């Protein structure tokens, strides 16, 4: 770079390369006090190098020895350094070097010191000695001179054959022009002096010259395409534009018979028309029979037509003609707030509307809609992207074929469910006897009431994070029973992973240990990066509480699961993308152990 000798407060941008990079990347995150980083300079007027004391600095502000990064993220490797003034105050050149930091490519800076400043207006272009004056060169290479730069401007100068006249010469020429003007100027215009011009070939009057003509007493042969203002003696030929003013007479125009009888008022409207019957077969409207016309074409009937065609003119807005020439009906009875309770008096709805077929169709439609609405509320998500029937749906299911409800028997059975002596809300309690099955959920007090008949009933209870080994309940009167659940011991997984588990039951609906459950990874989360997962089979055996648990599962992954030794009844579960409270009870499935 080149700088003027003696320059002060000079900041310059430098690039520091990363020696460990094979792509020429810059080395980011250097500070003035980074370990090993040093800087030296040597000027032509010195006998040895001088160390620069590096200091912290603010980007864009000068500090002697200042060293600051431009942007370590967006411009890694670029820094700003403040060159000490002493390095630039003597000699013809100076060399600066920065080095020593880890992975740093040394930075060498060479500065040529001159007597001129290359970045000021005083250098780089020819300038006049007087401020404000210019010396330019044209595109053809000719020099252009500001005449204000010419010394002794009162003297006539010979500039390559061009004579610049003095003010006296200009005044003499002006006086000569004035003497040549006719003395007969009238109102600033030339006086009307007729003079015959002999040779007029190639000459014509310009439009601005004609505009000064105030009267013309000669005849004009040819076409006039502009406008004429004033009176015209006569016009022979066609007039293509407008005529403003009075016209004496018009010849050559043939008007219809009785044209003079038309009553044309001051607005240009025809005020009187007599209809004439031109055919003897016209009986619809005879212009000569004024009495018949007045009888049939009344103002009332004219109003009807106006109301039909122009909807804005008729309060009932019965029929309107659209922009596409279609007739659009605006039915009064279908307007908002038109039909009220007074329209439902006796007989307002006739027998057709109350016919059995109509009523059946309406009831069928409403019933179908209700079934669909109920179906939506019956199916819920179990929290692991799998659907199941809601507890309410199971409670209200009919008896037989899976059972449901809390029964309608003669005995009242009140059951309380606890876990560590605390009531369990939402526990699913099932009573089974032969083909009869009733199921329901406990309330906030951990209680549920069944109505069943006498007999020995099998009690099954399920609840998240707890197990129940099953029990038998003999009902021969109204009964009250309490059952305690056992908390499931689940091994949690590390952060970012989860433990999933199932509770295994036998075909009799009781907790079953020793059941083999297998999982296999079949898909990774959408958009997942950086994971290389193993898809080998994982098999566990249900513990004494009937719990089969799998640790270290990855959120959002999809797994194939099956019970027993064969996968002919495999199911698929997808884990939540965001791990909930660990562990997680996974979606239910079924299978046999054979």
Image (cartoon, rainbow, N blue to C red):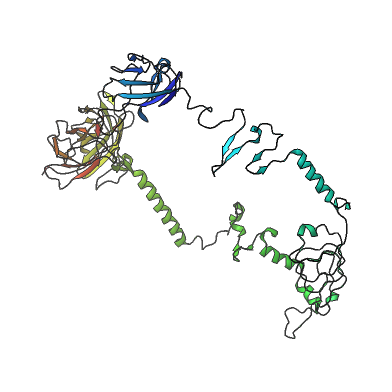
**On the picture, is 221 further left or further right than 593?**
right
**On the picture, is 226 further left or further right than 106?**
right
**In the picture, which quadrant includes the N terminus?**
top left
Q: Does residue 6 appear in the picture of this structure? A: yes
**Residue 478, percent from left and from top:** 27, 33
**Residue 416, percent from left and from top:** 28, 29
Q: Residue at image x 58%, y 35%?
A: 135
- When the figure is inspected, residue 283 is found, relative to residue 561, above or below; the finding is below
**On the picture, is 382 further left or further right than 246?**
left
Q: Residue at image x 45%, y 57%?
A: 362
- Residue 147 placement: quadrant: top right
**Residue 463, percent from left and from top:** 25, 33
User: Depth check: 460 or 213 in front?
Assistant: 213
Q: Residue furthest bottom?
A: 280
**Residue 222, percent from left and from top:** 77, 71
Number of marks in the image? 0
- Residue 127 placement: quadrant: top right
- Residue 220 placement: quadrant: bottom right
Q: Does residue 475 appear in the picture of this structure? A: no
**On the picture, is 497 further left or further right than 9?**
left
User: Depth check: 415 or 571 in front?
Assistant: 571
- When the figure is inspected, residue 376 is found, relative to residue 200, above or below; the finding is above
User: Depth check: 521 or 243 in front?
Assistant: 243
**In the picture, which quadrant includes the C terminus?**
top left
User: Depth check: 293 or 260 in front?
Assistant: 260
């Amino acid at each position: 770079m080149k700088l003027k000798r003696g320059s002060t407060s000079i900041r310059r941008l430098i690039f520091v390369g990363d020696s460990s990079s094979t792509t020429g990347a810059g080395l980011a995150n250097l500070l003035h006090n980074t370990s090993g980083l040093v800087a030296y300079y040597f000027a032509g007027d010195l006998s040895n190098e001088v160390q620069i004391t590096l200091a912290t600095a603010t980007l864009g502000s000068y500090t002697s020895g200042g060293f600051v990064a431009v942007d370590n993220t967006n411009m890694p490797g670029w820094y700003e350094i403040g060159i000490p003034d002493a390095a630039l105050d003597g000699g013809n050149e100076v060399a600066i070097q920065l080095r020593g930091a880890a992975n740093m490519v040394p930075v060498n800076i060479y500065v040529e010191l001159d007597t001129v400043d290359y970045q000021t207006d005083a250098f780089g272009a020819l300038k006049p000695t007087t401020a404000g004056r210019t010396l330019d060169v044209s595109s053809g290479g000719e020099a252009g001179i500001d005449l204000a730069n010419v010394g002794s401007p009162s003297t006539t100068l010979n500039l390559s054959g061009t004579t610049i006249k003095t003010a006296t010469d200009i005044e003499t020429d002006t006086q000569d022009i004035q003497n040549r003007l006719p003395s007969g100027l009238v109102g600033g215009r030339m006086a009307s002096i007729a003079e015959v011009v002999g040779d007029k070939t190639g000459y014509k009057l310009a439009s601005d010259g004609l505009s000064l003509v105030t009267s013309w007493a000669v005849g004009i042969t040819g076409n006039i395409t502009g406008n004429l203002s004033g009176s015209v003696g006569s016009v022979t030929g066609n007039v293509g534009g407008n005529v403003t003013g009075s016209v004496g007479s018009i010849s050559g125009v043939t008007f219809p018979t009785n044209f003079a009888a038309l009553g044309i008022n001051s607005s240009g409207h025809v005020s009187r028309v007599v209809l004439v019957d031109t055919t003897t077969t016209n009986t619809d409207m005879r212009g000569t029979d004024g009495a018949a016309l007045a009888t049939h074409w009344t103002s009332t009937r004219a109003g009807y037509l106006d109301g039909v065609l122009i909807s804005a003119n008729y309060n009932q807005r019965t029929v309107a003609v659209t922009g596409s020439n279609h007739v659009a009906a605006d039915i009064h009875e279908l307007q908002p707030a038109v039909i009220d309770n007074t329209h439902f008096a006796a007989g307002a709805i006739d027998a057709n509307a109350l016919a059995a077929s109509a009523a059946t169709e309406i009831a069928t439609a409403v019933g179908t809609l209700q079934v669909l609405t109920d179906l939506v509320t019956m199916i819920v998500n179990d929290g692991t992207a799998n659907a199941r029937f809601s507890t309410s749906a199971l409670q209200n299911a009919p008896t037989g074929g899976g059972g449901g409800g809390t029964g309608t028997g003669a005995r009242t059975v009140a059951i309380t469910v606890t876990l560590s002596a605390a009531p369990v809300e939402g526990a699913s309690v099932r009573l089974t006897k032969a083909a009869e099955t009733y199921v329901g959920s406990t309330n906030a007090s951990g209680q549920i009431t069944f109505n069943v008949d006498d007999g020995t009933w099998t009690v099954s209870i399920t609840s998240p994070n707890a197990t129940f080994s099953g029990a038998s309940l003999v009902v021969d009167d109204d009964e009250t029973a309490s059952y305690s659940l056992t908390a499931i011991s689940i091994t949690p997984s590390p952060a970012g992973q989860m433990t999933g588990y199932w509770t295994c039951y036998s075909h009799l609906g009781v907790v079953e240990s020793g059941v083999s459950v297998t999982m296999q990874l079949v898909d990774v989360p959408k958009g997942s990066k950086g994971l290389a997962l193993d898809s080998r089979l994982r098999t566990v055996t249900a513990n004494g509480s009937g719990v089969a648990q799998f640790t270290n599962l990855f959120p959002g992954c999809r797994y194939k699961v099956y019970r027993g030794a064969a996968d002919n009844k495999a199911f698929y579960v997808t884990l939540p993308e965001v791990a909930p409270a660990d562990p997680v009870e996974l979606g239910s499935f079924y299978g046999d152990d054979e």
